[in-house]
Image (cartoon, helix red, strand yellow):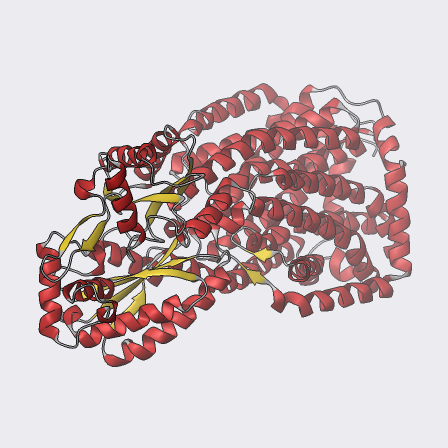
Amino acid sequence: MGWIVDHPWWVIALTGAVTLLFAAFIPGIKTEQDFREYLPRDDPAVQALEEAEERYGAQIFSLIAFEADDTVFQVSTLEKIKDLEDRIAEIPGVEEVQSLLTAQIITGTEAAITVGPAAPGGRVPESPEELSAYRDRVMGSRQLRGMFVSEDGQAAAIMFKLDPRLSTVETEEIARKVEVMAREYEGPERIYLAGGMFEALEAQRMMTRDLKVLLPVAVVMIVVVLYLSFRSLRGVVIPLVVVCLGVIWTVGAMAIAGVPFTVISIIIPVILLAMGTADGIHIVNRYYEVAARGLPKREVVLATMSEMTSPVVMTSLTTIAGFLSLLATFLVPQRQFGVFTAVGMAAELILSLTLIPALLSLLRLPATGTKEQQLEHGLLSRGLARLGSGVVRHRAWVLATAVVLVAISLVGVPRLRLETELSQYIGEDSPIAQTMQVMDDRFGGAMQLAIEIDTGRRDGLKDPEVLARIAALEGFLEAEPAISTTSSIADMVREMNQKFHGDDPAYYVIPEDGRLVSQLLFLFTFQGGSLGSMALGDFSAGEVFARVKGIDSTQEIEDLMERVQAYLDENFNAHGIRAQEVGIAQVSISLLNRLVASQATSLGTSMVAVWAIVALLMRSLLAGLISLIPLVITVALNFGFMAYTGRPLDIATMMIGSIVIGVGIDYAIHFQSRFRLEYARTKNPNPGRAIEQTMRTSGRGIVYNAVTVGLGFAVLVFSTLKGTAIFGSLIATAMGLSALAALTVIPALLATLRPQSITRGKGGPKRSNRKNKVKGKGGKR
């Protein structure tokens, strides 16, 4: 530390060089919103989806809807649809594209059955007669109505799929290109873009807007709080410089490691701004106290850092441990969030222990005693001292109240609602949500369930019994209120059978004769019909599709899929026919099912890690346990509040517990560290007097820190992402509760327990002895 104080410009130059190095990589950072990337590659749902894509092609479709005030069956509108469809088909990476003009339709009778585009040659009808006949043909088709055109004829859709082997970057480029193309055709028709890649694109835009708005707001808010706390330029600039450099180092490290921004990790910069001021606040706060002793500048800085290095290192290590506990979760973005927030905290720790003393050594000392006297005898310090005295007198009531609140909260925890749907995280007022509503109203939903039926034998799908089971499955699915339409090979067979029998609706059934089924399918394919992923080339397996509408939560999807899987088990799997859901919905359910276990694991890991670090560094098992108690209270109150108010436990809010433990432990450490010092200073050790003085000094730093961190997190409330806004409000409240618990529950516990077991480590010297030796160096205190 002496070298740093004696050579501050070397420290500043080295810090600047490292900052420029990391900053150079920041422009290369990417974004990622593919839910499959949220899960480990060995997750069964991800593996099933990828295997289905290998066998059948893309499982996720995108949709562009044209909505007219009157009808889409106008030449001008149909020409726009045709032109856009043709342009999309020319984009490399587009695997399949269809519209109400080119989607196949079965026409004719037994004498002349034809299979071809809904519009002859896929062209736009020209004459009024052709247009009228075309409209009647489309609106009378079971395959097209409700799928490519709305029931009232006022909306039409272009559906397309991408090569599943495309990278995220390539998919994003196609999404941008298609969006630009589609917007060229707006007016008077309204155009909506739905599908995972468009949702990801909109989420990315919202994230970018958030960074541009939230970061400056966070900086301004932190500056205001720091100034109100210290009323000095150095009290503002020094902590602010540390956090800003820490953000640059962290984002640069993410770019170097190839880790993208997600809806979770996008808040890392704001979190580092909010939390990173803690070390600077406590160091500057202590600096003013030491400066009041009248020591020379060099000794003031050295004494400050000597007294603060241990608690700063402890708080940083426990915070880092709290975030690293997220490595115990299964979600890849949460792991990345935990690792790089920990990296950011480590960077800010290094800066706090090097750059802050270097900067302080270059500045003149504040007026002797003035600043510290103003702070220590100010309104806040007096109020905290009275609070400490009141807690000591009524410690039993304080502890009893905490127990009751925790009990009430735990009773409500089973009501917690789990959520993994991106649309829910983004919010009901977003363009994505509005588009989803249009898709529900016009096309029976933009979500698709994909069910694989694998007979395990060649031509298995030509078996009338298997086809009858598939038709019955469609009937079961369509009886579900949330399912609008279904499609499968059974539909094609029934449609062909009806046409083969003079278009008699009574023959819209599966023939009992397997030879007739084979003839119908041969005729269908001979006429140019394509079954796509509804059947493999050897007819051993295929997929059944269902459009889902009106479902906006993962829990509803899971309930639906449980009913579907029960039906599949009873009517397919029990009869030697493998049937399973292989679409993106199953990935969402897998996320949901693993959230709770992941939450418990990360919380348990963070608690054990934090307790071990505090107990080891303070050389007291009891001190470690006391530090955890206010955190347990805060976590319980947070989850109880979420349960009673209907806030969801999602991929962001499930991290609150680990963050509270990692960040909130700072307050407990600083309080106990100062209490040990004040308790050892008194001639006749008195817990009450030590608590009162601790509240005047470190208590003030805890309040400054809690307000700064809380307001920093509260900035997230202004996020355009609903989930991020909820996360911000909850974590900001939790920070305030954590500080309040540290300033009430810990004093009550210290006044109740034997202070010697906390102020003296087992078999070790008093912590204060070492501190007093440092303070004594150079003369008076």
Query: How far across and how far down the image is residue 276, in percent?
Result: 62, 37
Q: Nearer the viewer, residue 431 or 21?
A: 431
The x, y position of residue 372, in whole percent, is 84, 32
Q: In which image quadrant can residue 191 be found?
A: top left
Q: Nearer the viewer, residue 5 or 596?
A: 596
**In terms of depth relative to the viewer, which is nearer, 238 or 224?**
224
Residue 714, relative to residue 105: is it above or below? above
Residue at point 31%, 67% (across, down): 580
Percent x, y of residue 363? 71, 20
- Which of the 4 image quarters holds residue 356? top right
Task: Give above or below for 68 relative to 59.
Answer: above
Where is residue 485 drawn, in percent x and y? 36, 60
Furthest residue in direction front, as rendered: 129
Depth check, front residue: 532 or 142:
142
Left or right: 305 in relation to 44 = right
Q: How many numbered tags mark residues here?
A: 0
Q: In this view, does 431 lie to the left or right of 688?
A: left
In the picture, measured across the screen, residue 119 lies left or right of residue 77, that is left
Residue 730 appears in the figure: yes
Q: Residue at x 41, y 67 (%)?
A: 561
Q: Locate the C terminus and report the quarter of the image it occupies.
A: top right
Residue 683 vs 301, above or below: the answer is below
Q: Residue at x 69, y 58 (%)?
A: 641
In the displayed structure, would residue 283 be above or below residue 730?
above
